[in-house]
Every structure is written in structure tokens, then in C-alpha cells.
Amino acid sequence: MNVNMKRLWVRSMLGAAALAAMAGGSAWAQQGQPVKIGLLATLEGPFAAGGADGMRGAELAVKQRGGMVAGRKIEIIKASSDAKPDVAVNATRKLVEQDKVDIMVGPLSGGEGIAVKDYSKTQPQVTFINGASGAQGTTLDSPSPNFYRFNTEGAQWMVGLGKAAIAKGYKKVMVIAEDYAFPYSQVQGFMTEFCKAGGKVPEKAWVPLGGKDYSSVIAKIPKDVDALLVVLGGADAVNFLTQYENAGGDKPMLGGSITVSQDVLNYKGKRRDSLVGTLSAGPLADAYDGADWKAFVADYQKTYPVSAGGFPSPSLFAYVYYVNMKAALDGLDAVKGDLSGNQAKYREALQKMTLKTPTGDVKLDGNRQAIGTTFVTEVVKDDKGNLFNKVHSKIDNVDQLLGMKKEEFKIGSRDVPSCP
């Protein structure tokens, strides 16, 4: 072969290699390169304590893999919001458009989730995986093809509580809840079952997120209700409980999932003890005796001891962020870190995945929404004075339509459902 022929041969071989690399997307170029994951939680506002624990849960999932997946380092870029949708979108936009993350995990709050889902439609090159937000509309109303939620949502979390309330003798209940999408979902999940069983809800008080004064709400609690369904989280829950105690309130309570999470149960105050016996429901129970759950709790406690800011048991936010980050990493592992072709293989892996979580298997429906387990729980006190949730009952394979036919189902709102 003469020199010119050899040069032509080399060029042709290089060209063929380039074409092969292009045909396979950028998989070759990705090998060994870091995967950038944006992590968004509320580190300001009423859910700041829960947001910090959400970050801990997500970081624990990364730590358990040694910070690597399929030979690629996981690089976490954090951002904070304050439970306001516009703030969450702005923080997400920075992570996506300036920091150029490959995958987004977040946000925390329901209204934020709907807003970030809408934004995700404008960024098809990035895969969005939920943090802890639990509004129904995020995946039920105009779902985004690149937004995935591996946690069950607010209404799913309340399945079983209505029946438990009736069994406890609570036939008439007043609702006190924050006025945005997630509490609407929680109230719907409770009332759908409660009303069907003959319960009545004569009064609903919708209060602003981040409210400080609950005196007017407390003043209008009917004397003849058997219990209060309180769907307030973080600082809002603490403020209400403190003011209700000071006003001499004595109605038993049913709790929303966020109302009896560890970030609330660990606040200091006398009213805290009156939460003992409170029935609630959600995607976890502190005292669940499943082996995988116990291992998760032990790992959380070892990594984030109380002395270093952790809670005696992981909060709802820590657990749900852990689940969603684990899904993000398990999906990467399934495709050997390949995010080429606009992440098509990765998204297919996420959609088909059976995610192994500490509380059981999770699968996604056609809207990329989790089908999973709900626990009805009861608040108890241990011998050290810590409050925690024990298992009252467990319901598996809870779907987003709450057992209803699609044509019968309506997303929860201020007025839906109703049983005065």
C-alpha cells in the first residue's frame, strides 16, 4: 500500500469510527464522565426542616452507591426554594439552563411540583424525577413525558384513614388544612373513603401556607365535631398545635401525612404529647418491622445522628427523596450510565422499572406515577420520650384513582369531595 493509499485508508477508518460514535449517540463520550444531578428542596419557609431532611435522604441514596454508578461519578448540585411555585421554577431553571444538569430531583411541595412539571415540558433533554411533592395534578392533569414520580401522592397517602376514623367512632370531622394543591389531595384521599362510610365533614378551614395566626380558625371549631383532620406541615403545624393548646382545645386529631412526620413530632411543647394516639396515614411508618425498612432506618441514623441534626427516625421527606433519588440511580445503573439519544434508553428503563424500596416494590402507571404502599399509623411515645408512628394497618398497590373508574374521578379541590 503506497503512502497516499494508506492515508486514505486511515481517514476512512477514522470517519467510520466517528459515524459509529454518532450512531450510538454520545455513549462513548459519556463513559467515565460525571452525571450531574440537580437536587432541589425547600430550605427556607415553613418546610425548611423537612427540606433539610429531604436533602439527607437523597444524599444517603448516593452514599449507598459510593457516589458512583456504572463507572460515572454522581455530582450533586443543590438548590433551595421556599415552597412557592415561582421560586421553585426559578431555582430549577438555574440548575437546568446554567448548571446544565442531566437529571433533576425535586421539588418538595405540591404547588411547586405542578409548576416544575410544567417547566419540564420546555426542557426535553433533561429527565425530571420528583422530590417529595404530592399534589395529584402533577401527574394526573396534563402529565409531562419527562417527569417521573416514584412516590405515591397525597391522596394515595390517606387511603385507609377514613375507615380507621369511622372505626374509632369519629363520624363528624372538621378539616383544617393549608390552601394549596397538596392538602386538597390529602383531604380528598381521606374524605372519599370517610364520606362513603357515612362520615360527615360540616366545616373546612383553608388557611394560607406559612400562616402565623390560627385564632379565627380555632374560634369556629364546631362543638359537636368528633375530631379534627389537620393537614398542616412543618412550622404551620407547630404554630397551630401551640395555639390550639393555649386556647384549651381538646378535640382529638387525625393527621395529614406531613402533620405527623418526624420534623413535626420532634418539636418541643406540651401539645406535642397530646398527639399521642393520633391516627394518620402515609407512605411510611416509623415502627414498620420490615427488614429493608429497618436497614434503611439504621443507615439513616448512623449517617445522620440526632447530634448532627438528624431525627430519631427519617422523616417523610427524607424517605421520599431517598426513594426518588434511588430510582434515578437505579435507572442509570440499568442503562450502564448511558444518557445518549435525549436519554431515551434511560427513560424507558425508568418507566419499566420495578423499584425496590424499603417499604416494598413500586411500579409506575402510564402517567409515570407510582403505585405503592400506604400505612395507616398511630402516634405513640417510646421510653426515651420520642414520638413515633406505629403501624395500624397496611394497604398495598394503591393507585392514583383511589379505586374509582377514570370517568368518575375528579381531582381534589376546595370543594371536591363534599359530604356536609
Image: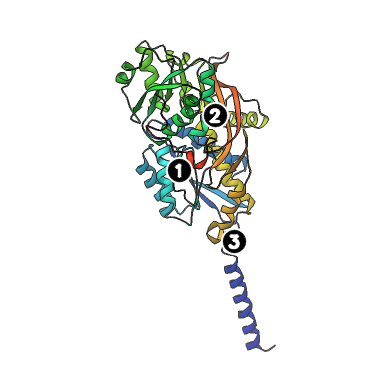
Figure quadrant of residue 300: top right
Q: Residues at badges 3 and 1 in contact (C-beta under 8 Å)?
A: no
Instruction: Tell me the CA gap for discs 3 and 1.
Output: 31 Å
Upstream in the sequence, badge 2 or badge 3? 3
The reply to whether residue 249 is visible in this rendering is: yes
What amino acid is labelled 1 in the image? Thr
Crowd tier of the residue under label 3, counting other residues whose Cα lies within 10 Å: few below 14, some 14–19, many 20 or above: some
User: Which residue is identified by label 1?
Assistant: 138
What amino acid is labelled 2 in the image? Pro
Instruction: Tell me the CA gap for discs 2 and 3.
Output: 37 Å
Mark 1 residue element? helix
Q: Identify which residue, 145 or 39, lies in the foreground.
A: 145
Which is in the foreground here, disc 1 or disc 2?
1
Mark 2 residue element? loop
Crowd tier of the residue under label 1, counting other residues whose Cα lies within 10 Å: few below 14, some 14–19, many 20 or above: many
Q: Residues at badges 1 and 2 in contact (C-beta under 8 Å)?
A: no
User: Which residue is identified by label 3?
Assistant: 27
User: What's the residue at 51%, 20% (across, down)?
Assistant: 165
User: Which residue is identified by label 2?
Assistant: 314
Figure quadrant of residue 163: top right
x then y, percent, for residue 254: 47, 21
Which is in the foreground here, disc 3 or disc 1?
1
Crowd tier of the residue under label 2, counting other residues whose Cα lies within 10 Å: few below 14, some 14–19, many 20 or above: many
For residue 139, side relative to residue 244 (left or right): right
Q: Identify which residue, 253 or 100, lies in the foreground.
A: 253
What amino acid is labelled 3 in the image? Ala
**Above or below 97: residue 161:** above
